[in-house]
Amino acid sequence: MAFPFGLTLQRMFTRPAKAVAVRRFDAKAGGRRGFGMGTFHHINSEVAGAGATVRARARYLAANNPWLSQAVANWAGALVGAGIVPTPKHPDAATRKSLTEAFNRWAEEADADGRTDLWGLQAEITRGLVIDGEAFVQVIMTGDGPRLRIIPPELVDESLTRELPGGGVIVQGVEFDGEGRRVAYHILPARPYDQFATYAPPVRITADQILHVLKPIAAGQVRGVSWLAPVILPASEFDQLCDALLLGVKIAAMHAGFLVDQNGTAGDTYTGEESGGILETGLEPGTLKRLPTGIDVKFNTPSQTQEVAAFLRLNLQQLAAGLGLPEHLLSGDLTGANYSSLRAGLLPFRQRVEQIQYGILVPQLLRPIWRQVITWTLLSGDLDGPDFEANPRDYMACEWLPPAFMQVDPAKQVQADVAEMEAGLTSRRKLVAARGWALEDLDAEIEADAFGKPKESPDAA
């Protein structure tokens, strides 16, 4: 069989198509069912391709989906509560007290925009960490000391990736030197009243002025990805399921029942009025209605609402698992819960919370803030530190203690705290700091209550 000349040339010069591996976050792709198993390649390529879309969808669901809105709030509450407080570790008690007081004074004015304090900023940062997968905080030096301003992640130029002379590289707006150290961030300028997307060249800001907080999911990850990524598609489909069920119930509620003409002879004898195709029988409370011969009544009893409760709960459990939350922190349902089941469910969650607090928030956010604030306080003369230059480590040493978890049975927890302290497994300072107090302040208040006037507390280290 002879082939047309044009078709022969086309086959000669056309390379057969190869199977292309699909790389994606499912939350960005729009669906995985029916397409087979996807693939996941280098983390930075995946985040570059999907991060912005995942972030936008996560923000939408966090603002509109009641389940995910509660999940985000509970994650932020568990991570920082009313605020993670510092406890200086300087060997001198008086210096510890001075450091704490100086930092707390600064914390009240920490927000560059004057909207909140350091503890409120912690809540905003952790909320952004959960929804966006990362948070950027700019440290602005002013005449009154460092000030903090949260920068939206989209302002760190995600489109900027290129190699630099000397072995450096910019990856999604983050600049590295030849040795792989972060040296700068390229920030797009923005004004508070901008309503539409505009473009201006990014501004290079050195890394010592930017705090980048993220929880990586793979080695070498540069930019973050939303913690909601595993549940964005299931949450969207769950919304659609709930909407469909609600619509079905609304339609079913429009019908009290149906009249069935069993033998086809009741049409001439039925006396109900017909309006727009709907038979109006005038049902009222207490009415006894006599139907003509051959008419039967079938009441509307939709079955979808009777069997779907277990399936809905299974979907909520799936969302909770994807978010790393106990189910009741997502759904708010405490049906069948008791002290033992709540404690068993909360223990692994609290372990995960502590991992993030001590492995991410402290080294990436809180410790750098302490060092910059205390250094400025000492160098500016607001705090007397005669041996600072000789022993800077003593002033920089600080332990950040998150608020103690709220207990289902506070009396038992107090007994456990006392037992641990008596056994030498913890200190009174740590227990007091976990409640959000400085030990010296608490001792001074206790003494003032006992003697009617405040006094300097002794060293109770």
Image (cartoon, rainbow, N blue to C red):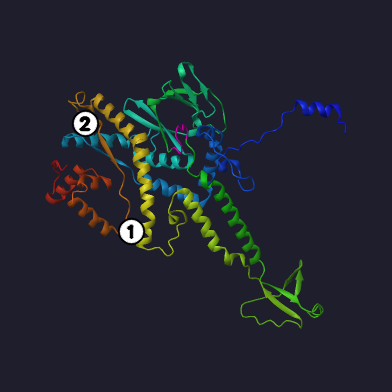
Q: Give SS at disc 1.
A: loop
Q: Which residue is mark 2?
A: 394
Closer-to-camera residue (21/461): 21
Q: Residue 307 location in percent, x, y?
A: 58, 66
Q: Quadrant of residue 206?
A: top left
Q: Give SS at disc 2.
A: helix
The span shown in magenta is: 216-223
Which quadrant does the N terminus fall into?
Answer: top right
Q: In this view of the protein, can residue 117 be seen by the observer?
A: no
Q: Residue at x 32, y 51 (%)?
A: 405
Disc 1: CA contacts within 10 A as few (<14), some (14-19) or many (>=20): few
Closer-to-camera residue (195/202): 202
Q: Residue 104 location in percent, x, y?
A: 27, 37
Q: In this view of the protein, can residue 353 be seen by the observer?
A: yes
Q: Residue at x 59, y 42 (%)?
A: 38
Q: Quadrant of residue 96?
A: top left
Which quadrant does the C terminus fall into?
Answer: top left
Q: Residue 35 location in percent, x, y?
A: 64, 45
82 part of magenta stretch = no
Taking 195 as reference, is 458 above or below it? below
Dominant SS type (magenta) = loop
Closer-to-camera residue (149/431): 431
- Residue type highlighted by circle 2: Asp
Q: Residue 219 location in percent, x, y?
A: 44, 34
- Residue type highlighted by circle 1: Val
Residue 408 numbered mark, or none: 1
Q: Residue at x 50, y 30 (%)?
A: 155
